[in-house]
Image: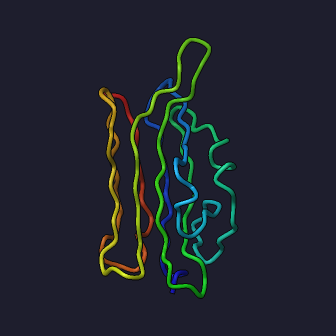
Amino acid sequence: MGWANWVLFRFVNKTVDDTLKLKFPNTDDHWGYPFAGTKDTNTRNRIEYSDIQQVDIKPKGSYSYGQTGKPNTFAGMEGTVDIYTKATAGSEEEKIARVFYSCSRHSPKNKFTISDTAPGWQVTQWGADLWGDALGSIKIEVRRI
């Protein structure tokens, strides 16, 4: 059921002087719910998207959170998260990239894409399981090039 559909994201900021922020452009369209980052995916303490958006991912730092389908449902989970630089006194925020993920109960294949990467940035991922119930643990590294 939906509980078998999950992903654990670890966003790693590889920059030396940019603080990163995560934003969710369409939370009303998300399936499932976010949970606090943990290595134990059996413990899924629900958090709000607004909690995640408050987090500053400092230079050379990281932040983890998960997304899960709801127990006893056939909905699976799906969502979109945008990666931004944090605005400072001397600069506006800059959108770096968009991440889309989906573990549908109605499809044998999961989806994970990184798109709209801004010039001068590199966003890479490791770990997406496109054929299992869960997308699994995915590390997303963000760096300037």
Seen at 57% across and 48% down, the residue is 63
Place of residue 108 in the rendered image (x, y in percent of width and height, measured from the top left): 31, 81
What is the quadrant of residue 126 in the picture?
bottom left
Give how far across and how far down residue 38 sits, in percent: 61, 64
Q: Residue at (60%, 62%) from the top-left corner?
A: 34
- Which residue in the rendered view is the most extreme toward the front? 28
Identify which residue is drawn at 53% across, 16% down. Answer: 91
Whole-percent x, y for residue 40 in the image: 59, 72
Rendered position, 130 above or below 105: above
**Left or right: 77 in relation to 52:** left
Which of these two is toward me, 48 or 37?
Answer: 48
Image quadrant occupied by the C terminus: top left
Q: Vertically, is 137 above or below 90?
A: below
Residue closer to the observer: 91 or 18: 91
**According to the image, what is the colour scheme of the structure?**
rainbow
Count of numbered labels shown in the rendering: 0
Position above or below: 89 against 112: above
Question: On the picture, is 70 further left or further right than 104?
Answer: right
The residue at 62%/14% (across/down) is 89
Q: Which residue lies furthest to the top in this view?
A: 90
Residue 122, given in percent of the width and then of the height, sits at 32, 37
Which is nearer the eye, 134 or 24?
24
